């Protein structure tokens, strides 16, 4: 599950500043525990997209490790997401079933650059 | 390749504030292009670890998409990394061989939380 916007897997955020929440998770080594994980992650993205101020989400997963970065217009939008009842329930499910642990970081995005083969050099 | 510190795949950073660089990459769909990718990523982490002010790196990769987050004491440390000659050469190789495109974001980390099954609730 990746938030594709066009042909590239990263979110085309507006110019900084805005906020990012980086969630790095240690995933259960028992694949039975991970049944439903991808579906739950997709549901989470659908939920987040309903929050005012949501800018997008990026997701990648290796064996044992997942990184999800969600982007938000401001801290109020991020707070709405963190307090969202369905999100809180999904987090509980994550702790009970999928995660061995996680670290979440709240970040103020100050600068960004983009490069793609088709628009080289294309940074801003 | 993940920066394991103990039993969990996330970096045990010191208390905020510090900086994060989020690199989200679109990877070539041609697996031949990706030969040597994991080795190059590991070399990149080894290089970064030599920079004063490096705090750690987290990495996850799906088909078509990779997310690397590196952590830095301050902007000066991050600048040293961005200007590191070997890093610049590795980035060039990435653009020529592995990446269809990427977006890099420079972030000021304001808060963080940790949870793990073994230390529940364990947030700070």
Image (tube, coloured by chain):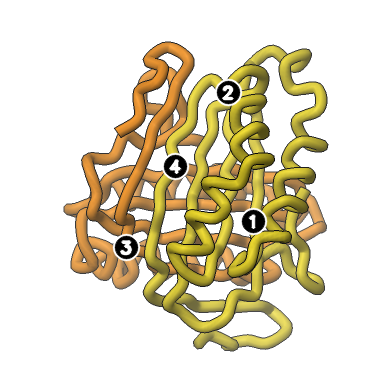
Chain colours: A yellow, B orange
Q: Residue B108 carries which label?
A: 3
Marks 4/2: CA–CA distance: 13 Å
Q: Which mark is residue A104?
A: 4
* Residue B114 visible in the shown view: yes
Marks 2/3: CA–CA distance: 27 Å
**Residue hosting label 1:** A58
**Residue hosting label 2:** A95
Residue name at image x 48 percent, y 31 percent: A102
Instruction: Report helix, strand or loop for mark 1.
Output: strand
Determine the chain carrying the residue at label 2.
A
Determine the chain carrying the residue at label 1.
A
Q: Are marks 4 and 1 on the same chain?
A: yes
The reply to whether callout 2 and callout 1 are in contact (CB within 8 Å) is: no
Residue A86 locus on image (x, y percent): 68, 40
Residue B23 relative to residue A59: left or right: left
Q: Do labels 2 and 1 share a chain?
A: yes
Select label 2 or label 1 by which is in front: 2
Viewer-side residue, A12 vs A56:
A56
The mark nearer the N terminus, 4 or 2, is 2
The mark nearer the N terminus, 4 or 1, is 1
Work out whether B6 lies above or below A52: above
């Amino acid at each position: 599950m990746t938030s594709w916007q066009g042909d590239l897997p990263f979110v085309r955020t507006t110019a900084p500043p805005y906020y990012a929440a980086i969630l790095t998770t240690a995933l259960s080594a028992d694949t039975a525990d991970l049944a439903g994980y991808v579906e739950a992650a997709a549901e989470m993205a659908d939920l987040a997209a309903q929050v005012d101020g949501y800018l997008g989400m990026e997701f990648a997963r290796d064996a044992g490790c997942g990184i999800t970065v969600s982007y938000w217009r401001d801290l109020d939008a991020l707070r709405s997401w963190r307090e969202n009842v369905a999100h809180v329930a999904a987090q509980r499910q994550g702790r009970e079933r999928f995660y061995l642990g996680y670290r979440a970081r709240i970040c103020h995005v100050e600068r960004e650059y983009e490069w793609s083969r088709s628009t080289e050099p294309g940074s801003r």
